[in-house]
C-alpha cells in the first residue's frame, strides 16, 4: 500500500446533474417540446445535425433578423449543503449563418426562493464573442482549411448562490437581436445541459468579502509520480495497481486538475460497429470507454474502446463530405503504455518533409482525454490527411479506428477553452508528454508566440508545465511533430 500522501482540501462533491432530460431526448406530450424545458420565441426541438451526421435531438435557436429565443429549465430543491457554487455547462454549435447584434447570445441564471415563486437575484454571461473568436481562430481547422468553427463546443457559466434562502435556479440559454443574412444555416444548436453544485469554485474564485478557508471535509492527495496524483476519499485505501474508470475519474489529477472528469464514458451509437463486427441497431451507454491503470512500476497503461463521446459524421460516408470514407466507427481494444515521468530523449528526431524519416508511425501517436487516438498528419499515401474530416475533426481508418489528425475542437474536456489563457490538456502523446490546446496566453496561439517558439516537435518548455506539445490549427504538423521521449510499441 502507498503511504506517501498529503492532506488536502477534498473537492469532490459527488453531486449529479440536476438537469432533467439533459440531452433533450424526451418529449413533453402536451407541448411537443423537450420534457422539463420551456422554449420561447424562435426556439424549437429538432435534430441538431445534418443528414450526413450522427447527432441527436437538441434545440435550434434560429437567428432570423429581429428574432429572439431561449431554452430554459427551473431546477427546484437546491440544497446549499451540497455546495454554494453552481455551474451550468452545455454543448453549443453555431451554424455558419448564425448572427446576432450587440453580443446577444447569453447564458443566464435566475435565483429563487419558495420553490421558484420568489425571485431573489440573477446573473448573465454573454458568449457571442466566443463564437466570433472561434470563427477568427479556427476557420482554418475545417475541411480544406475552411469552416472549422461550426463545430460543437463546451460553454460554461459558474456563479455563487447569492442568498441562503435560494432553493431554486432557472437556467437559460438564449439570444436576442437576430441578424442572420441567409435563409439557411442560421441556428445555434444547443444540447447536453449539465448543472452541478460544488463546495468551491472550479475557477478558483472565493466568496465576496471572505478569505479562502479550509473546507470541513478532507481528502488525501496520493502522489503517483510526475505531475500525477490521486485524490482519495477519507476512508479509501489506495494501492497499486490503481485503476481509474468513469466512477472515480474526478479523483485522478494531472497538475492538480481532474482532466478526465466526465470524459471516460461514451455511447455506442446506432450504426457503430462492435469489436465483434456487429453493427449497432440502437444506442447503448459505454461507461468505461477509457480506463487508465497506474501499474506501480513507473508506467501508465491506457485501455480504450476508442468510441468518440461527441457528434460525428455518419460513416461509412456515402455523401462524400468526408471523402467517401468506407469505414465504420468501430469499437477497439487499444492499449498504450507510457512512463509516469516522461523524459526528453537526446536521440529524439522530428519529422522531415512528408515524414520521410518515419519519425512518427502510422496509426496511433497518442490519445485524447476521451480515449480517441491521435494520428500523424498523413494518410497512407503521405498526403495531408487533415483536410478530410467530419466537423469534430475525426474519421475512421480502414481498420475502423476513429482518430484525429488535427486539433479535435469538439473534445469535451472538463475545462472549456475560452482562449483567455493557456489552453487545458487535451491528451497525451505515446511518449507520455501532454498535448495542450492551441492557446498560449489570452488570444495568442502557441503557433504564433515569438519568445518561446514551438520546436520541430510542436513543443516547448515552461517552468509551470515542463515540456509539452500544442495543437496548432492550420499549421503543420497540427499536433505532434515527432516523439520527444521514449515510446513503447506495446499495443493490443
Image (spheres, rainbow, N blue to C red):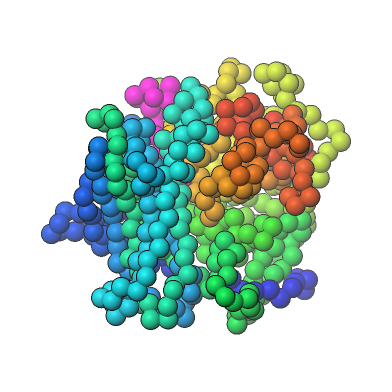
* Farthest-out residue, right: 346
Residue 269, above or below 163:
above
Depth check: give the residue in front, 96 or 58. Answer: 96
Residue 276, above or below 319:
below
**Residue 490 located left or right of residue 180:** right
Rendered-image quadrant of the C terminus: top right
On the question of residue 51 being in view, the answer is: no
Depth check: give the residue in front, 323 or 408. Answer: 408
Q: Position of residue 180 (x, y in %)?
A: 29, 34
Query: Which residue lies at the image location 81% right of the left edge and 33% below the top edge?
Result: 348
Dividing the picture into quarters, in which one does residue 382 lie? Answer: top right
What span is colored magenta in the figure? Answer: 307-323
Residue 436, above or below 325:
below
On the question of residue 67 being in view, the answer is: yes
Prevailing secondary structure of the magenta residues? loop
Query: Which residue lies at the image location 62% right of the left edge and 37% below the top edge?
Result: 445
- Asked whether 312 falls inside the magenta stretch, the response is yes
Depth check: give the residue in front, 407 or 232. Answer: 407
Rendered-image quadrant of the N terminus: bottom right
Dividing the picture into quarters, in which one does residue 157 lie? Answer: bottom left
Query: Which residue lies at the image location 69% right of the left edge and 57% below the top edge?
Result: 255
Amino acid at each position: 500500500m502507498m503511504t506517501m500522501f498529503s492532506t488536502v482540501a477534498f473537492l469532490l462533491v459527488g453531486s449529479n446533474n440536476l438537469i432533467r432530460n439533459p440531452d433533450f431526448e424526451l418529449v413533453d406530450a402536451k407541448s411537443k417540446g423537450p420534457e422539463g424545458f420551456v422554449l420561447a420565441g424562435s426556439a424549437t426541438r429538432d435534430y441538431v445535425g445534418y443528414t450526413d451526421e450522427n447527432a441527436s435531438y437538441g434545440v435550434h435557436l434560429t437567428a432570423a433578423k429581429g428574432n429572439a429565443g431561449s431554452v430554459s429549465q427551473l431546477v427546484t430543491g437546491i440544497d446549499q449543503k451540497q455546495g454554494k457554487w453552481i455551474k451550468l455547462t452545455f454543448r453549443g454549435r453555431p451554424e455558419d449563418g448564425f448572427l446576432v447584434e450587440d453580443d446577444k447570445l447569453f447564458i443566464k441564471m435566475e435565483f429563487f426562493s419558495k420553490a421558484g415563486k420568489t425571485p431573489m437575484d440573477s446573473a448573465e454571461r454573454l458568449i457571442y464573442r466566443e463564437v466570433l473568436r472561434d470563427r477568427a481562430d479556427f476557420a482554418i481547422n475545417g475541411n480544406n482549411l475552411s469552416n472549422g468553427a461550426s463545430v460543437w463546443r463546451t460553454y460554461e457559466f459558474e456563479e455563487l448562490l447569492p442568498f441562503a434562502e435560494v432553493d431554486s435556479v432557472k437556467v437559460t440559454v438564449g439570444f436576442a437581436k437576430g441578424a442572420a443574412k441567409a435563409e439557411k444555416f442560421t441556428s445555434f444548436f444547443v444540447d447536453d445541459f449539465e448543472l452541478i453544485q460544488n463546495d468551491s469554485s472550479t475557477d478558483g474564485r472565493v466568496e465576496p468579502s471572505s478569505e479562502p478557508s479550509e473546507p470541513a471535509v478532507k481528502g488525501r492527495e496520493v502522489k503517483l509520480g510526475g505531475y500525477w496524483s490521486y485524490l482519495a476519499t477519507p476512508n479509501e485505501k489506495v494501492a497499486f495497481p490503481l485503476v481509474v474508470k468513469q466512477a472515480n475519474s474526478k479523483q485522478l489529477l494531472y497538475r492538480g486538475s481532474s482532466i478526465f472528469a466526465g470524459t471516460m464514458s461514451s455511447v455506442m451509437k446506432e450504426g457503430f460497429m462492435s469489436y465483434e463486427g456487429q453493427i449497432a441497431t440502437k444506442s447503448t451507454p459505454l461507461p468505461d470507454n477509457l480506463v487508465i491503470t497506474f501499474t506501480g512500476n513507473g508506467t501508465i497503461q491506457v485501455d480504450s474502446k476508442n468510441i468518440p463521446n461527441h457528434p460525428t459524421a455518419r460513416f461509412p460516408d456515402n455523401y462524400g463530405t468526408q471523402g467517401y470514407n468506407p469505414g465504420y466507427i468501430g469499437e477497439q481494444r487499444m492499449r498504450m503504455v507510457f512512463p509516469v515521468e516522461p523524459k526528453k530523449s537526446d536521440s529524439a528526431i522530428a519529422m522531415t518533409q512528408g515524414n520521410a524519416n518515419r519519425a512518427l508511425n502510422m496509426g496511433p501517436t497518442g490519445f485524447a482525454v476521451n480515449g480517441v487516438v491521435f494520428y500523424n498528419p498523413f494518410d497512407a499515401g503521405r498526403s495531408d490527411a487533415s483536410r478530410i474530416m467530419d466537423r469534430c475533426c475525426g474519421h475512421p481508418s480502414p481498420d475502423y479506428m476513429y482518430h484525429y489528425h488535427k486539433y479535435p475542437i469538439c473534445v469535451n474536456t472538463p475545462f472549456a477553452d475560452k482562449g483567455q489563457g493557456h489552453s487545458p490538456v487535451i491528451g497525451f502523446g505515446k511518449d507520455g508528454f501532454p498535448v495542450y490546446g492551441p492557446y498560449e496566453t489570452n488570444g495568442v496561439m502557441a503557433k504564433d508566440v515569438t519568445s518561446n517558439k514551438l520546436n520541430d516537435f510542436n513543443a516547448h518548455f515552461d517552468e509551470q508545465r515542463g515540456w509539452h506539445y500544442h495543437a496548432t490549427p492550420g499549421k503543420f504538423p497540427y499536433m505532434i511533430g515527432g516523439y520527444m521521449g521514449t515510446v513503447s510499441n506495446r499495443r493490443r
